[in-house]
Image (cartoon, rainbow, N blue to C red):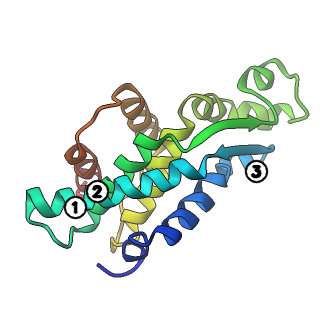
Amino acid sequence: MDGLFADLEQEELFVSFISEHFRQSPTEIASVMHCTNHIDEERIRYSFGEYKQNLEKFDVFLRSRNPDHYKRAGALLHSLHESEIITKVDLESTAEELEAGYTRVNYGDAEHILKFVEFYETYYNQMMCFDVSYRACAAYENTPVQYDFDYLYNMCRYLRSNSNLALDTFFMMFKSLMAR
């Protein structure tokens, strides 16, 4: 496989790509206030080892020496989900502060992003894992299916509620999403 997934098989490129993604605040929040994601590089390096091991599982169990982008995206999501890369999130204003009006964020913006901030406070690791894995998968699609907030919320809730999911579950998420 060429492109992004070939790059992700090299540890330094993996660490750089994942670090850059996880340090970025969601645009929904960053457009209104400051948000800092604190990440653990050791967990990213651990995730790389898990990613490579997941690819090897496909080779052994599915006789798939060059897994398609659905399997690779699933392997990536699985490895990132297991690693919980973000250790802490610093929001300029919490959802509680936004709702109460104890913030420099104006009322209209606060009202607009409140639901997303509540979501992000709970699901930051799951959201960032799913988002980067989805983007990697979508890069190989001619017309990738776009997901909405409801889909993202349900996917993140599912990931957080199920800490011991099989690798196959992760690649089927992307295969079924893109087949819609």
Residue 107 is left or right of residue 44, and the answer is right
Viewer-nearest residue: 149 or 50: 50
Q: In the image, is residue 123 above or below residue 17?
A: above
Q: Image point 51% across, 53% down: which residue?
A: 44
Look at the picture and state if 134 lies above or below 95: below
Q: Is any part of residue 123 visible from this angle?
A: yes
Q: CA distance from mark 3 to mark 2?
A: 38 Å
**Residue 115 occupies which quadrant of the picture?**
top right
Q: Please tell me which residue is depicted at 20% across the width and 47% down the height of the picture.
A: 168
Quadrant of the rendering where the N terminus is positioned: bottom left
Q: Residues within 10 Å of mark 1 (few under 14, many from 20)?
A: some
Q: CA distance from mark 3 to mark 1?
A: 40 Å
Residue 152 x/y as whole percent: 45, 41
Q: Secondary structure at mark 2?
A: helix
Let me know if residue 178 appears in the view.
no
Which disc number belongs to residue 92? Answer: none
Three-letter amino acid code at disc 1? Glu
> How busy is the neighbourhood of tag 3: few (under 14 within 10 Å), some, or many (20 plus)?
few
Amino acid at pointer 2 = Gln
Checking the image for residue 56, the label placed there is 1
Numbered circle sitting on residue 53: 2
Percent position of residue 64, x then y: 13, 67
